[in-house]
Image (cartoon, rainbow, N blue to C red):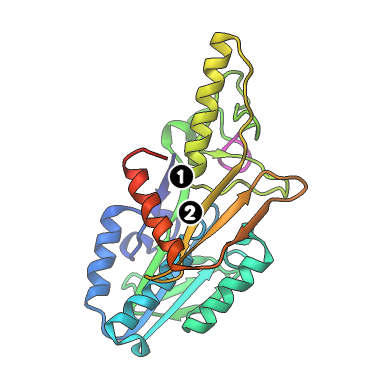
Amino acid sequence: GAEYDWGATPGAQDAYSFYDIASARRLRRRLSRMKRGHISIGIATTPYKCPPAPYETAMILDWFFRQQGNRQDIEITLSSPEQGPVPVAGPDAMSAIRRAFDRKGIQLKTEVGVASVRSDGLEVAYSDGSSLDVDVAVTVPHHIPAAIVRDSSLIGPSGWVKVNSQTLETSESEVFAIGDVNAVPMANGKGLPKAGVFASAEGETVGYNIAAAINDFTPVNFPGEGYCFIGFGGETSAQVVGNFLAEPNPEVRLTAPTARGLRSRERFERDWKRFRI
């Protein structure tokens, strides 16, 4: 899997986040007391787990403060080093999320990563030299491979374990890498998103093929099909879904956010907890 390098972004260790249970609970306590002010959600760098998560969080915060009745007193800004929201889903999806942000009054800064957070947590500095005064700084931390893998010979130029996109085999024969630790190349030159649905499918593929090698039957290729949910608030949810390993480019789209989509997401989460994927 992936670990977090909080020290890679100065000040991030003492800022807020939601990428582990302890930090999410701490952020929840802070937001539950917030009546007015500016919240910044900043992505330091890519790749990171679940590409829609920061955008979903911004829209859920918009919904939450509207429910609280003080949204007019809350500013929300999201910054990303990428050219737009969830670019793997394509230009139509990026435009749809931008429009949703505009309707909800969420400010979006693209092509800038978080460079540092001031020690008191009240200023965020960006990679382009600009800065922003805030009341709550929320960061998406740098992601790195687990230490046992970082210390091995498997790490490729990307900083992750490069694998064959069909078999998930590494540069070492009969050694496979599945889940967030790997870098599965897509046809557009970028890496497959780091998401639980892919980790699960990769595990099934590799497990089957190890059994195939032992029992002398035909192996299968990793299909590269998957989906991620993205909540557009507390009442609707959409999906980023498609064939991420399609040629010559990923065939991925964003579905419309609906209440039915939210019910599907809730069912997915219940099943995931029960290992019924």
- Between 157 and 46, the one lying in front of the other is 46
In the image, is residue 267 above or below residue 185?
Answer: below
Residue sitting at x 57%, y 42%: 159
Q: Secondary structure at mark 2?
A: loop
Q: How many marks?
A: 2
In the image, is residue 191 above or below residue 64?
Answer: above
Res 42 seen here: no
* Badge 2 amino acid: Cys
Tell me the quadrant of the picture where the N terminus can be found.
top left
In the rendered image, which quarter is residue 154 located in? Answer: top right
Residue sitting at x 55%, y 27%: 153
Q: Which residues are magenta?
A: 156-162
Res 69 seen here: yes
Where residue 133 appears, as percent x and y from the top left, is 41, 81
Position of 104 compared to 188: left or right?
Answer: left
Find disc 1 in the rendering and name its residue: 196
- Between 34 and 67, the one lying in front of the other is 67
